[in-house]
Amino acid sequence: MFISCVYIQQEAIYCIKVNFNKEFDEVFVKKELELTKIAEKNKRIKKILDDIGVNDPVYEPEMCSTEKPEMLLTTTDEEVTSVLY
C-alpha cells in the first residue's frame, strides 16, 4: 500500500515536471521570437535615426544568463581582469 502511494506521488511529480518543462520551452521560444522582432525593428530605428542625424542609443534587450544556462559556462574577454602575457 505504502509503496503504491509513493509510486503514485512520483508519477504525479514527474507529470508536473514534464508539463512545466513543456510550457517553459514554449514561452522560451516565444521570447526568442519577440527578441528577434525587436532586433529587426531596432535596425529600422537605427537607420531612421542615422538618416535624420540623431545619435541616440537604442535599447537592445537580450536574454540573461539565468535564461540561457549555457551562457554561464562561457567567459568573455571583458570578464578577465588579469593581464595577458
Image (spheres, rainbow, N blue to C red):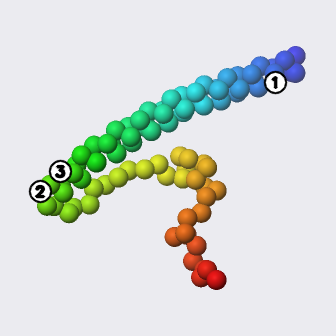
Question: Which residue is depicted at the point 35% across and 52% down?
Answer: 60
Residue that label 1 marks: 6
> Mark 1, mark 2: which one is toward the viewer?
2
Q: Amino acid at mark 3?
A: Ile
Residue that label 3 marks: 48
Q: Nearer the viewer, residue 43 or 5?
A: 43
Q: Amino acid at mark 2?
A: Ile
* Mark closer to the chain start, 1 or 2: 1
Assess disc 1: are there few (<14), some (14-19) or many (≥20) residues with their C-alpha within 10 Å of its C-alpha: few
Residue 67, percent across and down?
Answer: 53, 46
Question: Which residue is depicted at the point 50% across and 36% down?
Answer: 28
Q: CA distance from mark 1 to mark 2?
A: 68 Å
Would you say 80 lies left or right of 64 here?
right
Would you say 51 lies left or right of 2 here?
left
Assess disc 2: are there few (<14), some (14-19) or many (≥20) residues with their C-alpha within 10 Å of its C-alpha: few
Question: Which residue is depicted at the point 65% across and 26% down?
Answer: 18
Assess disc 3: are there few (<14), some (14-19) or many (≥20) residues with their C-alpha within 10 Å of its C-alpha: few
Residue that label 2 marks: 52
Q: Secondary structure at mark 2?
A: helix
Q: In the rendered structure, are the residues bearing label 3 and label 2 in contact, judged by CB atoms less than 8 Å apart?
A: yes
Would you say 47 lies left or right of 60 here?
left
Residue 45, percent across and down?
Answer: 22, 49
Q: Amino acid at mark 1?
A: Val
Q: CA distance from mark 3 to mark 2?
A: 6 Å
Q: CA distance from mark 3 to mark 1?
A: 62 Å
> Mark 3, mark 1: which one is toward the viewer?
3
Determine whether 78 is above or below 66 in the image. below
Q: Quadrant of the C terminus?
A: bottom right
Q: Secondary structure at mark 3?
A: helix
Determine whether 84 is above or below 72 in the image. below
